[in-house]
Image (cartoon, helix red, strand yellow):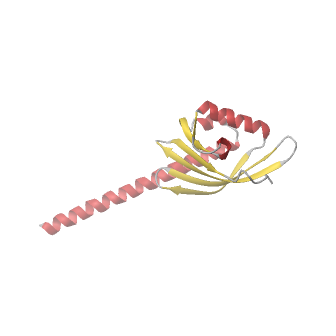
Amino acid sequence: MRAIKILVSGIILSSMLMSCEKSNEKIQAENEMLIRNYFELFNKHKWKALSEMYVENAEFKDPSFGNGIVKQSKAEFVKKYAELNQIFPDLKDSILQIYPSGDKNIIVEFVSTGTAPDQSKFELPISTIFTIENGKITKDYTYYDNFEEAK
């Protein structure tokens, strides 16, 4: 009788672990789709729609903000990218690789490019760690070399 209880417990535990694993894979796939959509909207310069992918006052870490973490509203996000887009009308991000990390984080390696009004071009390799909770981006931690001259 004890052996049957142990066997049944093992089957239940195994089933629960498999269920969690499938659930985690599903969440990762949904998060990856969200981020792919993010980059599509970015490349179409749909700043308002892009801002809706974030929670209000999401956390941002970006060399353009200085050191540390800055909370930014959706309106501030739209303003920042609309201004950047005025300087670089052909602003575009090209994904190199997406790395899912757990059920809340997606790391994206990409290259941002654009052309200024004086026809100077830039090409900047960037990595961003997105934290996604309940289908919305809560953290956007971006890393790039902001000391290297644009090429």
Image coords of residue 103 (percent x, y): 46, 52
Image coords of residue 93 (percent x, y): 70, 49
Image coords of residue 44 (percent x, y): 70, 41
- The residue furthest top is 75
Image coords of residue 56 (percent x, y): 54, 33
Question: Which residue: 62% across, 35% down?
Answer: 49
Instruction: From this view, report whether residue 23 is shown above or below residue 134.
Output: below
Q: Which quadrant is home to the C terminus?
A: bottom right
Number of on-image labels: 0
Nearest to the observer: residue 87 or residue 9: 87
- The residue furthest right is 118
Question: Which residue: 51% across, 49% down?
Answer: 30
Q: Which quadrant is home to the N terminus?
A: bottom left
Q: Is residue 23 left or right of residue 36?
A: left
Nearest to the observer: residue 61 or residue 19: 61
Q: Is residue 38 left or right of residue 101?
A: right
Q: Is residue 96 left or right of residue 54?
A: right
Nearest to the observer: residue 145 or residue 44: 145
Instruction: From this view, report whether residue 133 is shown above or below residue 18.
Output: above
Residue 12 found in image quarter: bottom left
Question: Which residue: 70% across, 53% down?
Answer: 145
- The residue furthest left is 1
Nearest to the observer: residue 135 or residue 70: 70
Question: Which residue: 75% across, 44% down?
Answer: 91
